[in-house]
């Protein structure tokens, strides 16, 4: 079971729809390449078939992921002072008083920002943040040792 935010689910659904919409285009490429003759040495045909295979594998992967994913907050109300998937949270390091913004996500987007650090729900920080409340001090077991952070606020974007 993978927890994802409603935004992450929509992104996956959009990707799936886009790939399915490309099916006729790939089929047309295959048909056109087939008309060129000898399939053994037809590079266009083989390239189109390979593209089709990669695309169909990605479609199956997205469909499986969506079927197993649980959308955070779906059907349940989350208290305003509780950290949950999709939340951006201001934390204060208890040791050095440094404050930073963290966003709790189901899957890292790969986009890096100086303002907000993404943490996945399965990471040590994400596990500690999940369901934490404003004012609570959380313990995060990191490879370099234990860190403690106070949840200052949940930032509304």
Image (spheres, grey):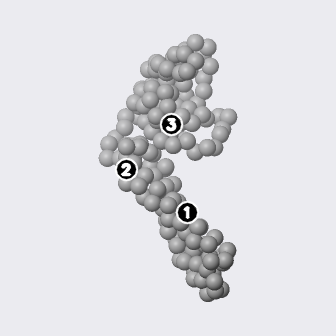
Examine the rendered structure and indicate whether residue 40 appears above or below residue 66: below
> Label 2: which residue?
68
Q: Which mark is residue 120?
A: 3
Examine the rendered structure and indicate whether residue 88 appears above or below residue 92: below
Upstream in the sequence, badge 2 or badge 1? 1
Q: CA distance from mark 1 to mark 3?
A: 27 Å
Return the x and y of residue 47 as percentages of the image width and height. Answer: 63, 70
**Is residue 16 in view from this perspective?**
no
Q: Nearer the viewer, mark 2 or mark 1?
A: 1
Q: Quadrant of residue 102?
A: top right
Q: Are marks 1 and 3 in contact (CB under 8 Å)?
A: no
Q: Residue at x 67, y 74 (%)?
A: 43
> Label 1: which residue?
54
Upstream in the sequence, badge 3 or badge 2? 2
Q: Are marks 2 and 1 in contact (CB under 8 Å)?
A: no
Tag 2 secondary structure: helix
């Amino acid at each position: 079971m993978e927890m994802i935010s409603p935004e992450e689910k929509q992104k996956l659904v959009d990707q799936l729809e886009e790939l399915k919409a490309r099916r006729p285009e790939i089929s047309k490429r295959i048909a056109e390449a087939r008309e060129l003759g000898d399939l053994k040495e037809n590079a266009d045909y083989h390239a189109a078939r390979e593209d089709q295979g990669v695309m169909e594998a990605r479609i199956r992967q997205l469909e499986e992921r969506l079927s197993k994913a649980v959308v955070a907050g779906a059907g349940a109300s989350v208290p305003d002072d509780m950290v949950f998937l999709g939340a951006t949270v201001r934390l204060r390091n208890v040791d050095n008083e440094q404050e930073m913004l963290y966003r709790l996500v189901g899957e890292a987007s790969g986009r890096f920002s100086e303002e907000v650090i993404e943490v996945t729900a399965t990471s040590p920080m994400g596990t500690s943040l999940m369901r934490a409340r404003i004012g609570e001090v959380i313990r995060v077991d990191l490879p370099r040792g234990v860190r403690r952070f106070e949840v200052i606020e949940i930032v509304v974007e």
